[in-house]
Amino acid sequence: MGYLDGKPHQASPGPFDAETYGIKTTAADLIRFVQANIDPNSLEPALPQAVAATHVGYFQAGTLVQGLGWEQYPWPVSREALLGGNSDEMIGDPTPVVALAPHAPTSPRLYDKTGSTGGFGAYVAFIPSRRVGLVMLANTNYPIPARVEAAYAILQQLASLPDRDPQTAAP
């Protein structure tokens, strides 16, 4: 159950509801998914290549690079660039893009994705080179800028921690 305008709200059936509400998850499951994106080599042999394919960029708009689902930014990224890539204008207005020759990133990246429906909101972000990530799930649709601001502040702190041994540290 989510909340819309302070009142209980459930996802409602309708056209494209399966696509819109396609992933129903818990924070624990989603953080395992983020962990798999941070360290795909810990997965079964066929999966690292599939995960790596989602990290390939195909189009660029400003500093945002769009891949297969994940959006990515060079790390470190400024707060303003991250907010701009997740802004109402980027989401709703025509945006000039440049097609990229698809290739795996060669420098540190921040990957992210927002998601929301009436009554629910989510934000996922991770930085594989720093072995940090976060998942934010809410049963109310907080504005995207608020989600991005909170995540950015947390990631700045986590990414500034000394490097951790990948064998003993969870992301």
Image: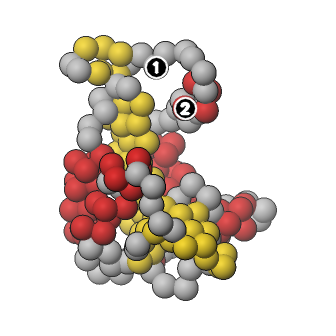
Note whether 139 is above or below 44 in the view shown.
Answer: above
For the residue pair 164 and 156, the one nearer the viewer reads as 156
Residue farthest to the right, as pictured: 46
Q: Which residue is located at x 71 percent, y 62 percent?
A: 50
- Whether residue 134 is visible: no
Q: In the rendered image, which quarter contains the C terminus?
A: bottom left
- At label 1, counting other C-alpha atoms closer than 10 Å, the crowd grade (few under 14, some 14-19, many 20 or more) is some
- At label 2, counting other C-alpha atoms closer than 10 Å, the crowd grade (few under 14, some 14-19, many 20 or more) is some
Q: Are marks 1 and 2 in contact (CB under 8 Å)?
A: yes
For the residue pair 71 and 41, the one nearer the viewer reads as 71
Q: How is the image coloured?
A: secondary structure
Note whether 123 is above or below 101 in the view shown.
Answer: above
For the residue pair 40 and 3, the one nearer the viewer reads as 3
Determine the image quadrant of residue 5.
Answer: top left
Q: Which residue is mark 2?
A: 20
Q: In the rendered image, which quarter contains the N terminus?
A: top left
What is the count of numbered marks? 2
Residue farthest to the bottom, as pictured: 106
Q: Position of residue 117 (x, y in %)?
A: 42, 31
Q: Amino acid at mark 2?
A: Thr
Determine the image quadrant of residue 157.
Answer: bottom left
- Work out how far the residue at label 1 is from the one at label 2, CA to CA, in angstroms: 10 Å
Determine the image quadrant of residue 85.
Answer: bottom left
Q: Position of residue 100 (x, y in %)?
A: 61, 76
| Circle 1: element type | loop
Q: Which residue is mark 1?
A: 11
Q: Which residue is located at x 39 percent, y 56 percent?
A: 90
For the residue pair 21 and 130, the one nearer the viewer reads as 21
Q: Amino acid at mark 1?
A: Ala
Left or right of 106, for residue 149: left
Left or right of 60, for residue 143: left
- Whether residue 47 is visible: yes
